[in-house]
Structures are given as C-alpha cells and as structure tokens.
Amino acid sequence: MSEPDEFSIIDQLFKPLAGLSREARGLIDDVAVIAGDLSCDLVVNTDALVGGIHFFEHDPLDLVARKLMRVNLSDIVAKGAKPYGYQLVTAWPRGTTYAEKADFARGLKIDQDRYGLSLFGGDTVSTEGPLVISMTMFGKAPAGKTLSRLGAKPGDRVLVSGYIGQGYLGLKALQGQLLGLSHEDVNEVISAYHLPEIRTDLIPVLRDHARSAMDISDGLLADADHLARGNNLMIRLDLNRVPTSLSARAAIASGISPVALCTGGDDYQILCTASEMGAKALVLAGFYDIGACVGLSDDTPAGAELWSDNRRLDVVKKGFTHPL
C-alpha cells in the first residue's frame, strides 16, 4: 500500500483533534476564524516552506522571505480578510551567516511595508537539516463575513483573479526545462515563481460578491476539485477561458501543455464562485469567469473536470500533493 498523502493525513489524524471547534472550520478552509469584538473576526493562517522542496536552496533569501509572506497572505486575502500582522519561526541550518539572515530580514521588510504588516513575534532555532521557515498570518474581516470554501451552489459561476501557470513555468525555467522562450519571457515567469502576485485590492469586491473562495496553491484543477468536493457538486472548468499571460502562450507554442498550466501549482490566485449577478461584478473588478458549478446526478460524482471545445479532458493528476 502507498503512503497516505497530506490530505489523508489531515483527515485521519488531525481533523479528529479539531473536533467541532467553530474556529477550526473542520480543517477544510486553510484558516481559523476567531470571533473578535462585535465589529470583526480574527482570521489566522499558518504555512511553512522547506528548502529543497518549496524553494531552491540557492535561492536568494530575500526572495524566499517575500514568497513565504505572500504564500500566507494568499490564504488570508482569499477569505476576504485584510491582513495586518504575522509571527515568524525560522529553523536555520548550522553555518548560516549573519549576512544571509540579514538578507532574509530585508526581504520581510520590503513586503511587510508593501502590505502594511507588522511582525508580532515568533521563534528562531538551528537545525542540521535544510532551512525551514513558518509564518502565521493574522487578518481581520467584518464579523460573520469571512468567506469559506463552503457556500458554492449549482449554477454558480467559477472565477479566478489572474493568470494561471506562471509559477509552474517559473519552476520549469529554473530547472532548465523551459526552452525556446525569450529572455524576457523566462525572467517574467521566474519572477512569478519567486514573487506571486497577491491581489489585496480585490478584498472588498470578493467579500461582497463571492459565495465561496480559496487560494490556488496546488494547481487550479486540484484546488477546484477540493472546493467542489467540499460543496458536494461538480465544477466544470473551460480550458479555453483560463487566463494565461503572453509568456505562457509562448510556452504553449513551444510545446508546453496548456493542461499542465492548470495542474502545476504555485499560482496563489483567488479561486471563487458567485451567482450570475455576483460574477458580473467580479469580472468588472478584474476576475476571469472560467467555468460553472453543476449539481450532481447518478453519473456525476463530486469533483472538478477540465473541458475544452465541449469535450472532457482525461487528466490523471490534477495537481500537487505532499507525499507525507
């Protein structure tokens, strides 16, 4: 038997620990929501990055720090919450120099100023292994208004906040597997891999018009599948409507599969569902309408499918999972 993946580990070992805690939301939602005062809820998320797995060990540490912050910001923003502070844990490999740690802190400073954040505390330790960094991000949302993965309904439109596949292509470029692109295109996708775009400007319209929402980290199709299963419905995505950059189109022309862009991960865009009316408002704000939620029938199991030219595509692996 194969080892269980990260989602099986969460379901089997950690969901029972969360129990019926209102704050934990059944561990399905990437964040905890803690009732604050009468005006707001506290929204909390934690994500970690490990050297050699989530970033290359030779990556500049200022960029690693900024990616860590943005990965955590992504979950908060996707719930319609405004981020305002964070805690940090660093496990430094023995021999890491002060100058390297200073580069890491410099990267944090750049993005915490950009997004209006403050460091609240944390811990720093040493390790014999690779660099391990973890951040807990805090956000605020109007009381009772924090979005969830739950809430999607049959007939809803499915939308994303920006280009899909940029991070995947950046990873391929850094691995030397992206050939035939211009120097400018390669630099663009590498930058997207190191520094994913976090659309804090979309928080108000998302909160006002989306029914359900999450960020895209494991791949568009995989995360749409998580959302669909959580709501016990089918999501059908139209490959021809998935937004891609000029660089991504150049990569497709050079032989990269457009399906791979939807399964590669590292997008950190917002995936949401909305009513027809809500979807129109979201599109006006910059979202892209890429599919629909469909009710289940006897021959339609819950999950997400990718379609192109009225044909369902057979996709074996929908996205990235950690083999824990």
Image: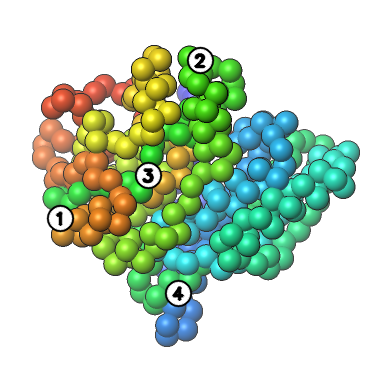
Q: Which residue is mark 2?
A: 179
Q: What whole-number distance in Å separates the C-alpha atoms at marks 3 and 2?
A: 24 Å
User: In this view of the protein, which residue sits in the foreground, 2 or 149?
Assistant: 149
Q: Is residue 297 left or right of residue 62?
A: left
Crowding at dot 2, Cα within 10 Å, few <14 / some 14-19 / many 20+, comes out as few
Q: Which residue is mark 4?
A: 41
Q: Which mark is residue 302?
A: none
User: In this view of the protein, which residue sits in the foreground, 302 or 147?
Assistant: 147
Q: Which residue is mark 1?
A: 276
Q: What whole-number distance in Å separates the C-alpha atoms at marks 4 and 3?
A: 27 Å
Q: Which residue is mark 3?
A: 162
Give the SS element for disc 2.
loop
Q: What whole-number distance in Å separates the C-alpha atoms at marks 2 and 4?
A: 47 Å
Q: Amino acid at mark 4?
A: Asp
Residue plotted at (26% across, 38% down): 303
Residue 89 x/y as whole percent: 71, 54
Q: Amino acid at mark 2?
A: Leu
Q: Where is 79 relative to 127, above or below?
A: below
Total count of labels: 4
* N-terminal-most mark, 1 or 4: 4
Q: Amino acid at mark 1?
A: Glu
Residue 117 x/y as whole percent: 61, 65
Give the SS element for disc 3.
loop
The quarter of the picture where residue 96 lies is: top right
